[in-house]
Amino acid sequence: MPVRAGQPAPDFSLPSADGETVSLAEYRGRWVVLVFLRWLG
Amino acid sequence: MRQKQDDLSARGAEVLVVSFDPLRRVRGYCRRQHLPFRCLADEQRLAYRAYGLGRASWLRTLSPRALAPYVKLFLRHGRPRPVYTGQDLRQMGGDFVIAPDGRVALAHASHDPSDRPAVDELLGVMPSSQEPGARSR
């Protein structure tokens, strides 16, 4: 079931290309745009 | 989205690009594309699943509407995009705007590969940072 507007955003913790581990929670207090890609190609 | 980076910065917004490809491919892709955003690897698709982003049917994945952008690319550049072994063409993407309070302000799970919201739609849910009286006429 896709997440809907108004719901709490699910947190996650993922490795980043710059060598760190990034959690959505780190950005609390800021606007965040999440872009989930399809395949990179 | 790259062209709207100033608008995003004006709103103090951070863009996180998530891919299910292996980290080394994500790193290479973001470097080649010179993406000014943070790129994350979700190889196990935990975040994809948490946000409800599943896999489309082959019918949707190979529909004319879904293939049209790739055909245009091929016609423009004369070569197909490479597909490596193990790449999942059916995994759907999506775009979400998360408000400072941690709630989802906009959710757009793609229905087919060509289904993505315009950046202006994403910007539209974030208040502009322009202060009243900034412009004088």
Image (cartoon, coloured by chain):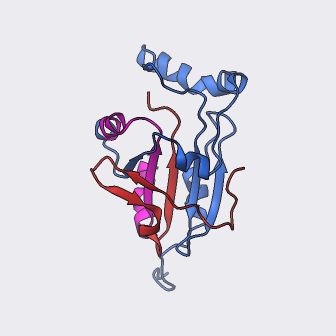
Q: Position of residue A18 (x, y in %)?
A: 27, 50
Q: In the rendered picture, chain A carries what hue? A: red
Measured as percent of width and height from the top left, residue B16 is found at 44, 54
Say above or below: B44 vs B50: above
Q: Give the percent coordinates (x, y) of residue B105.
A: 63, 65
Q: Horizontally, is B110 left or right of B6 in the view?
A: right
Based on the picture, tell me whether residue B36 belongs to the magenta stretch.
no
What is the magenta range? Answer: B1-30
Check the image and report above or below for A26 versus A17. Answer: below
Position of B133 with respect to B58 (left or right) is left
The residue lying at 67 percent from left, 34 percent from top is B112
* Quarter occupied by residue B85: top left
**Residue occupying the point 61% across, 29% down:** B90
Q: Quadrant of residue A41?
A: top left
B21 part of magenta stretch: yes
Instruction: Give the colour in which the image draws chain B.
Output: blue
**Quadrant housing residue A6:** bottom right
| Image point (68%, 63%), residue name | A5
Q: Residue at x 65, y 48 (%)?
A: B52
| Observer-nearest of A39 and B32 | A39
Image check: B23 left or right of B130? left
Closest to the observer: B129 or B105?
A: B105
Asked if residue A9 is positioned above or below residue B17 in the image, the reply reads below
**Residue B73 x/y as whole percent:** 48, 23
Marks counted in the figure total 0
Q: Residue furthest top?
A: B78
